[in-house]
Amino acid sequence: QVQLVESGGGLVQAGGSLRLSCAASGSRFSILAMAWYRQAPGEQRELVAGITPGGSTNYADSVKGRFTISRDNAKNTVYLQMNSLKPEDTAVYYCNAEWVALRRAYWGQGTQVTVSS
């Protein structure tokens, strides 16, 4: 079982920055594929960024060049650095972990990010 706890959300003006953190429980963090998703009101949840156990990353086109995902295996934590934020980035951001070998996925409770214009 993996438990995920997000932090770092909040209210920021357009053009500002936030850093989200997601702390994972357990001793298997280094083998987990990690990702950040977001869900705006009335919209489907969408992938924002992902990072493999080996450190390869991928991003949604809408955030490329503005957001950076990273992981610290020593701290069991994945981060999402968000720069040049736009009002359309407003959403609840969810941390996701995938234990590929067991075909299991885990979700955090979400953290609200609100970008004012």
Image: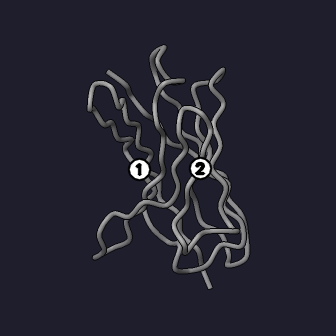
Badge 2 amino acid: Thr
Q: Quadrant of the N terminus?
A: top left
- Name the residue rendered at 60%, 66% in the picture: 11
- Name the residue rendered at 53%, 39% in the picture: 52
Front-lying residue, 20 or 10 = 20
Badge 1 amino acid: Gly
Residue 92: image quadrant is bottom left
Query: Residue 15 appears at what percent x and percent y?
Result: 73, 76
- Contact between marks 2 and 1 (CB within 8 A): the answer is no
Q: Is residue 17 above or below residue 107?
A: below
Q: Is residue 12 above or below residue 54?
A: below
Residue 117: image quadrant is bottom right
Residue at the farthest top position: 27
> Which of the labelled discs sits on residue 110, or is there none?
1
Q: Which residue is mark 2?
A: 57
Mark 1 element type? loop
Residue 72: image quadrant is top right
